[in-house]
Amino acid sequence: MFQNAIRYTAALGALAVLLSSCGLKRHKYDNPITKDTQQPDKVLFDSAINDIEHSRYERARLTLQTLMNTYDTSEYLAKAKLAVADSWYREGGAHGFAQAEAEYKDFILFYPQMEEAAEAQEKICKMQYEQMDKSDRDPAHTLRAEDECRQLLVQFPNSKFAPEAQQLLRNIQEVLADAEFKVGYFYEHKGSFPAAANRLQALTDQFPLYSQSDEALWLLGQSYHSMGDRFENQEAAAYTKIVKDYPLSARANDAKSKLEEMNRPVPEADPVAYAREKYELENRTHRSLISRAWGPFAGHPDTSPSAKSGTPQMAGLRPTIPASVPAAAAGQQGTSAEVSAQVESNSNLIDKNPDARAAAANGTAAANGTVAASGTGGTNATGGTDKAASGSASGDQATAQANQPLPSNHVVKQKKKKAPKKSAKKSKKPQPQDQQQQQQQQQSGQSGSAPAAQKQ
């Protein structure tokens, strides 16, 4: 009896799939025209919509094309152009989505004031969103989805699709931020601390709604700590941001302890950030057991940890200048990092003028000598100490700190010297029997030499 029930259910399922594939199952169209008229253009439009609802997309597009070519002044012309794009969207696939996006773009270009223009932009955003890959894979569709959803919020801010587009944008930025976090985590554990700090700093500054921003800030502080004492201010800023903006984080107490060890002030928690973080913890989506088990094999990213509130960033992720780059090279503090070149007409200057590299080296040596000379001091005639001597210690420390090499991503590991190989031929230790034979030979030699001396 149980086997018969299983067979009956399987037969019904196969029949449903067959009917759906044959176009007998109806999927209701979103934007039909309810006007009851027997105009020929309206009859063509209704016939095409009926084909779209029953998955006969090629036939529907031929009918709509006939309508647009025959009745170029029809009141249903805009609806027909939108229906063509909808047919490609329903057909799906990479080819169908590409054709649908082109048709939707044309519709927005020709009819930007219609209500359906915002819907067309929303479907473009959804098409790219549905093709997103995981954070450790190709981000092409993810970046396109971010641009299209942002375009919807910029071009149609008062549309009914704006709230949904905001949530989609939060989900998209969660995936982009997770990709940056994985790269920063890899660099931090590898020992490339400047690269890790650059990635994590850009992540925490530009994507504050990321679900693991507190952990990213913690790794950022650890990276600056490993880069040396000159980056102590950046390290303290990372810990301060954890305490202030993520008070419910598991790293909040550790960040407070770090600030106390560094003798830095511990800030109070921001009440707005506290309320937002509490709301996120209470409304976070929890995945089912089957979803967690299938996660490693799924092609789409997991967006359940993404934020449910807050304004998403309207500017994409942009690379930043690492903190380990000198200020002169980065174009900071009134300097310029731009490089310009020009053709010199006088060729004699190349032969007569001194080498610029040698002049730069001499200038650096002279500057170091000046600093060393100005940092020395002694005792005056009255037994007092000169002012230069009192500031020599601080000056030497500042000079030593300034002359320290900047941290690099390429950590050179010192190779251990191998022990010298022992010679293959080892000296054999004389055995006790061999020692006795040598002693007897020496004694016999001495006894034989004595009579010979007497004869002489």
Image (spheres, rainbow, N blue to C red):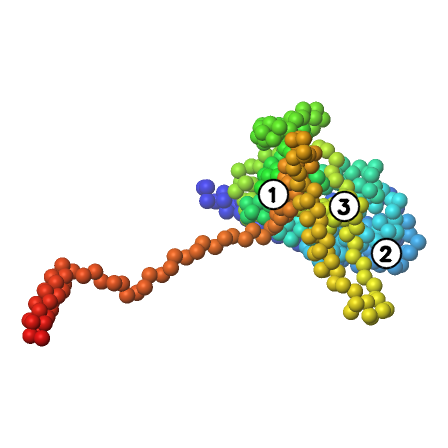
Residue 199 in view, yes or no: no
Viewer-closest of 372 and 270 = 372
Viewer-closest of 271 and 233 = 233
Residue at the image position 60 percent from the left and 45 percent from the top: 193
Q: Position of residue 125 (x, y in %)?
A: 74, 46
Q: Are marks 3 and 1 in contact (CB under 8 Å)?
A: no
Please indicate whether residue 43 sits to the left or right of residue 421 in the image: right
Amino acid type of disc 2? Leu
Q: Are marks 3 and 2 in contact (CB under 8 Å)?
A: no
Along the polypeptide, which appears first: circle 2 or circle 1?
2
Secondary structure of the residue carrying numbered label 1: loop
Q: CA distance from mark 3 to mark 1?
A: 20 Å
Amino acid type of disc 3? Gln
Q: Position of residue 414 (x, y in %)?
A: 50, 53
Secondary structure of the residue carrying numbered label 2: helix
Query: Residue 18: which disc?
Result: none
Q: Is residue 382 above or below residue 36?
A: above
Viewer-closest of 35 and 205 = 205
Closer to viewer: mark 2 or mark 1: 1
Query: Residue 332: which disc?
Result: 3
Residue 450 in view, yes or no: yes
Amino acid type of disc 1? Met
Residue at the image position 66 percent from the left and 49 percent from the top: 132
Mark 1 Cα-neighbour bin, 10 Å: few <14, some 14–19, many ≥20: many
Secondary structure of the residue carrying numbered label 3: loop
Mark 2 Cα-neighbour bin, 10 Å: few <14, some 14–19, many ≥20: many
Closer to viewer: mark 3 or mark 2: 3
Where the N terminus falls, by quadrant?
top left
Q: CA distance from mark 3 to mark 2?
A: 63 Å
Query: Residue 227: which disc?
Result: 1
Along the polypeptide, which appears first: circle 3 or circle 1?
1
Occupied quadrant, residue 267: top right
